[in-house]
Image (cartoon, rainbow, N blue to C red):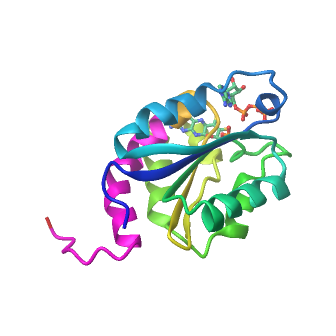
C-alpha cells in the first residue's frame, strides 16, 4: 500500500494552446508545488481539449501506471471545446461529490465565475481523479480546499482499516 508522502501522482494539463506550445504551463507547475509533500510526480502531460485523448491518458495512468492520484487542470468550463468533466465521467467508477461541492462552494466566496466550473472528482480502481480549473489562480484556490483531505481519502481507498475519528 502506498504510504503518506509516497503517493504516485499524475498531472494532466488540458489546454489547446499549451499542447501547441503556445502557452507555458504555469497551472501544472502550481499543482506540482502544492502536492510535493504528498508524493512524487510520475506522469505529466499537456494534452489538447480532445475527449478521446483525455480518456486514453486517464485510462493509461490508472490501469497501467497505477497512479494513486491524478490532478487535471483546464477544460472544466463553458467553452465549446471544454470536455474534461465528460472525459472524467467516462472513466470513473464513482464520484466523490463532496470534493467538487467543497471546491465550488469555497470558490464562490472568491468569484461568481466559480459556478461555471463543472469540475468533478471521482475514483477509478484505486486511483483518485480530481478536476481543477485552468487558470493558475483557479488551481491554487481549488486545490487548497481539497488538499487536507487527500491523504486520508487515498489511504481509505486502498483499504486502510484505521479509525476515521479524530
Ligand atoms: N495551463 C495553463 N498555464 C497558465 N495559464 C493558463 C493555463 N490554462 C489556462 N490559463 C490561463 O487561464 C485563462 C483561462 O483558462 P481557459 O482554459 O479558459 O483558457 P483557454 O485560452 O481557453 O485555453 P486553451 O485554448 O489553451 O484550451 C487563460 O486565458 C490563461 O490566461
Ligand atoms: N477558486 C476559483 N475558482 C474558479 C476560478 C477562479 O479564478 N478561482 N475561475 C473560474 C472560471 S473564470 C472558469 S471559466 C471556470 C472553469 O475554468 P476552466 O474552463 O479553465 O477549467 O473555473 C472557475 N473557477
The image shows residue 108 at horizontal and vertical percentages of: 49, 42
Q: Is 78 left or right of 102, judged from the image as shown? A: right
Quadrant in which the C terminus appears: bottom left
Left or right relative to 162: residue 8: right
Instruction: Identify the residue at image location x=53%, y=36%.
Output: 139
Looking at the image, which residue is at 82% across and 35% down? 16
Front in this rendered view, residue 112 or 25:
25
Residue at x-position 38% and y-position 55%: 150
SS assignment for the magenta stretch, majority: helix
How many numbered markers are drawn? 0
Q: Who is closer to the viewer here, 36 or 1?
A: 1
Q: Is residue 113 left or right of residue 142?
A: right
Magenta region includes residue 17: no
Q: Position of residue 65 (x, y in %)?
A: 60, 60
Q: What residue is at 35 percent from the left and 77 percent from the top?
A: 159
Q: Quadrant of ligand 2?
A: top right
Residue 64 coordinates in the image, percent (x, y): 65, 65
The residue lying toward the viewer, choosing from 101 and 2, is 2
User: The N terminus lies in which quarter of the figure?
Assistant: bottom left
| Residue range of the region highlighted in magenta in the rendering | 140-165
> Residue placed farthest to the left in the image?
166
In the rendered view, tell whether residue 115 sits above or below residue 15: below
Q: Position of residue 56 (x, y in %)?
A: 77, 60
Q: Is residue 143 magenta?
A: yes
The answer to whether residue 18 is above or below residue 60 is above
User: Toward which corner of the image does residue 55 lie, by quadrant?
Assistant: bottom right
Q: Answer with left or right where residue 95 lies relative to residue 23.
A: left
Amino acid at each position: 500500500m502506498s504510504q503518506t508522502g509516497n503517493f504516485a501522482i499524475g498531472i494532466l494539463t488540458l489546454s489547446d494552446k499549451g499542447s501547441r506550445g503556445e502557452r507555458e504551463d504555469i497551472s501544472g507547475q502550481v499543482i506540482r508545488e502544492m502536492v510535493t509533500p504528498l508524493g512524487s510526480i510520475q506522469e505529466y502531460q499537456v494534452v489538447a481539449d480532445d475527449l478521446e485523448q483525455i480518456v486514453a491518458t486517464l485510462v493509461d495512468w490508472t490501469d497501467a501506471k497505477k497512479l494513486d492520484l491524478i490532478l487535471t487542470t483546464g477544460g472544466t468550463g463553458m467553452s465549446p471545446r471544454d470536455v474534461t468533466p465528460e472525459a472524467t465521467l467516462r472513466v470513473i467508477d464513482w464520484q466523490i461529490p463532496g470534493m467538487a461541492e467543497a471546491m465550488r462552494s469555497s470558490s464562490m466566496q472568491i468569484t461568481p465565475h466559480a459556478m461555471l466550473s463543472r469540475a468533478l472528482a471521482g475514483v477509478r480502481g484505486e486511483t483518485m481523479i480530481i478536476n481543477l480549473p485552468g487558470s493558475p489562480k483557479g488551481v491554487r484556490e481549488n486545490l487548497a480546499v481539497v488538499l487536507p483531505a487527500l491523504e486520508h481519502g487515498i489511504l481509505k481507498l486502498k483499504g486502510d482499516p484505521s479509525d476515521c475519528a479524530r
